[in-house]
């Protein structure tokens, strides 16, 4: 597994003979519907990589017990994902509904 930061616009890359995954991790201490921020470059990268791009959305993160965290996964072009709305002014991602069905 390769690790990366801003220059590639994702946190991790996983590539083997069967699949390619580019993973961005977004974490908050709030609930699953707590908004999070994403850069224009990350949005562009999700458009470019399509189904190879994943956002692992970690929430209810407890700094004193980091193993106690919930998550869901958003895959593909984040700008066309029906479960979120992206505020254009500051690239804040708002979850439109419960993520239990994701």
Image (tube, grey):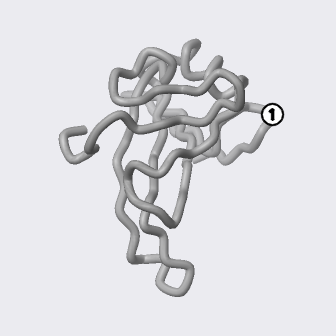
Can you identify the residue that label 1 sits on?
Answer: 7
- Compared to residue 3, the image places residue 95 above or below, namely above
- Compared to residue 16, the image places residue 98 above or below, namely below
Q: Residue at x 49, y 28 (%)?
A: 53
The quarter of the image holding the C terminus is top left
Instruction: Indicate the quadrant where residue 59 lies.
Output: bottom left
Residue 90 % position (x, y): 71, 31
Q: Residue at x 58, y 13 (%)?
A: 48
Residue 12 % position (x, y): 60, 44
- Compared to residue 44, the image places residue 8 above or below, namely below
* In the foreground, 42 or 49: 42
Q: Residue at x 48, y 39 (%)?
A: 55
Residue reaching furthest bottom? Answer: 64
| Label 1: how many Cα within 10 Å (few below 14, some 14–19, many 20+) | few
Q: Secondary structure at mark 1?
A: loop
The answer to whether 99 appears left or right of 101 in the picture is right
Residue 31 % position (x, y): 40, 59
Residue reaching furthest left? Answer: 101
Q: How many marks?
A: 1
The answer to whether 76 appears left or right of 83 in the picture is right
Instruction: Indicate the quadrant where residue 69 lies.
Output: bottom left
Q: Residue at x 42, y 77 (%)?
A: 67
Residue 32 % position (x, y): 38, 53
């Amino acid at each position: 597994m390769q690790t990366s930061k801003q220059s590639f616009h994702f946190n991790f890359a996983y590539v083997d003979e069967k699949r390619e995954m580019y993973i961005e991790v977004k974490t908050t201490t709030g609930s699953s519907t707590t908004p999070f921020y994403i850069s224009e470059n990350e949005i562009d990268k999700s458009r470019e990589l399509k189904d190879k791009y994943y956002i692992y959305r970690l929430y209810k993160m407890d700094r004193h017990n980091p193993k106690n965290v919930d998550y869901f996964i958003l895959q593909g072009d984040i700008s066309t994902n029906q479960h979120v709305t992206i505020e254009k002014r500051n690239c804040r991602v708002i979850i439109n509904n419960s993520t239990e069905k994701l």
